[in-house]
Amino acid sequence: MSLPAIVIKNLVKRFGDTTVLQDINLEIPEGKVSCLIGPSGSGKSTLLRCLAFLEESTSGMITINGEALGFFENANGKRERLPSAQIRAVRAQTGMVFQQFNLWPHMTALGNVSEALKTVHKLPRAEAEARAMAQLRKVGLENRANHYPSQLSGGQQQRVAIARALALEPKIMLFDEPTSALDPELTGEVLNVMRDLASEGMTMVVVTHEIGFAATVGQQISFLDHGRLMFSGPPSEIFAKPRHPRLDQFLDTYLDRGASMLV
Amino acid sequence: MIFNPAIIMEKLPEIGSGLMVTLILWLVGIAGGVAVGFVVATVRRFGGRMINLGLGTIVEVLRGTPFLIQVFLLYYGGPFIGLMLDPIPCGLIGLTIYSAAYYSEIFRAGYAAVPPGHVEAAQCLGLTRLQAIRRIQIPEMALIVLPPSVNLAVILLKESAVLSIITVPELTATVSAIGSQQYAFLEAIFLLAVIYWVIVELTGRLGRLAEHRLSRLRFANA
């Protein structure tokens, strides 16, 4: 078995007096789709944001493909922050997709996707745009390259955001509730892009309320509640009956909304 | 009083020169104010806490006192600190400082209105802090501040009339002087109102046109 893509060890995150993540230990397998599920406020988004280094953990360690993210333990066992260039290098292995898309409104779809190739990777404009175009083709938006975000539907915007992250060829893709801001009709096109990505063997960590997606595409399901990782395992185990009572209670709210494939 | 615009019309060349002075004062006041205001807002946003506090205090004092008083202080108080200014340079500097204070506040609000997620996306893609400021935050801010900037430009045009008090030969000073000489004060004041209003109206239309042109570059989701 290959090494895990991400190792999370004793991760704690506090905002002031509030503990949002309590002692999380989790290994994300390489080339698999790992879904983080749980009720609102359970800490799943915060955990993902820690993996993207958008939040800095209070204690504990995150390792991405064997490299420490953000902090390391020095010889005395004290946690120290890594230099920012090194942090950027480790972060470059992950791509992030947000609930609110976060496309830059003053750039076209092509501009959004090629921006980091130009400014960070210093590629010549033509090459950056050719690569960006290939990513847009991949998400089926080649013919929208010169549209501004305001001229695209929510689903299209999110697909551009996925292309933007993929353009930098990350080894791991992080998704923070990628379909929560979309109406149901547009959710499908984004999930399809994510399914394609999964079938190509991309390592994916997905915070989602799409239990159906988690159950069918997810290969590792982690259930968080009140900042704790309650349990983690393949969907066949997690969703099989008898279930953990807390998960059962959580899933009930979904069954009410028609996720009957799980019953 | 007999309302007779013909009296004013004889003095068109003088009025034209007053208008030119007003337009120059105004445009320099906008350009200088935008430039200084941008620097102030940017330093306040991305510089340290103390610098933000210091600049913030200066801005609050400038926004909290009447323009007329500021101009008096600069014109009559300047010589006490060795600053002897002729009316026009004094007017240019005064208007620029006043406009910079307000523009800096507009830009500050503009920076605050850029969604933090847009910057997070830049960070995730490996842009440095400086690259994110230059490529994302400044352009987005610039689009957000367009409507209030046009509004402030209009206010500055009207405020420039205050400079007539320190004998700057601008539009208001020129036209009201003509009015007094010709015993046609009401006609003069009426003409002034029309000229200012025409410039304001044109500026507003230009601003709305620019806004319309740039509308697709604004938020798609918020």
Image (tube, grey):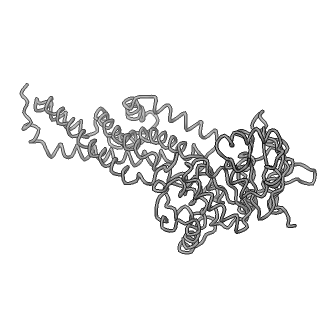
Percent x, y of residue A223: 78, 46
**Quarter of the image with the N terminus of chain A in it:** bottom right
Residue A51 vs residue B40: left or right? Answer: right
Vertical placement of residue B158 versus A81, above or below: above
Residue A93 vs residue A180: left or right? Answer: right
The quarter of the picture where residue B151 lies is: top left
Percent x, y of residue B188: 16, 34
Percent x, y of residue A113: 57, 64
Could you say which is closer to the camera, residue B180 or residue B206? B206
Could you say which is closer to the camera, residue A236 or residue A175? A236
Percent x, y of residue B101: 46, 38
Count all numbered tags in the image, as a single digit.
Answer: 0
Q: Image point 63% across, 38% down: which residue?
A: B50
Q: Image point 55% across, 57% down: which residue?
A: B135
The quarter of the picture where residue B14 lies is: top left
Could you say which is closer to the camera, residue A118 or residue B191? A118
Vertical placement of residue B124 versus B170, above or below: below
Which residue in the rendered view is the most extreme toward the right? Answer: A76
Which residue in the rendered view is the most extreme toward the top? Answer: B1
Residue A166 vs residue A146: left or right? Answer: right
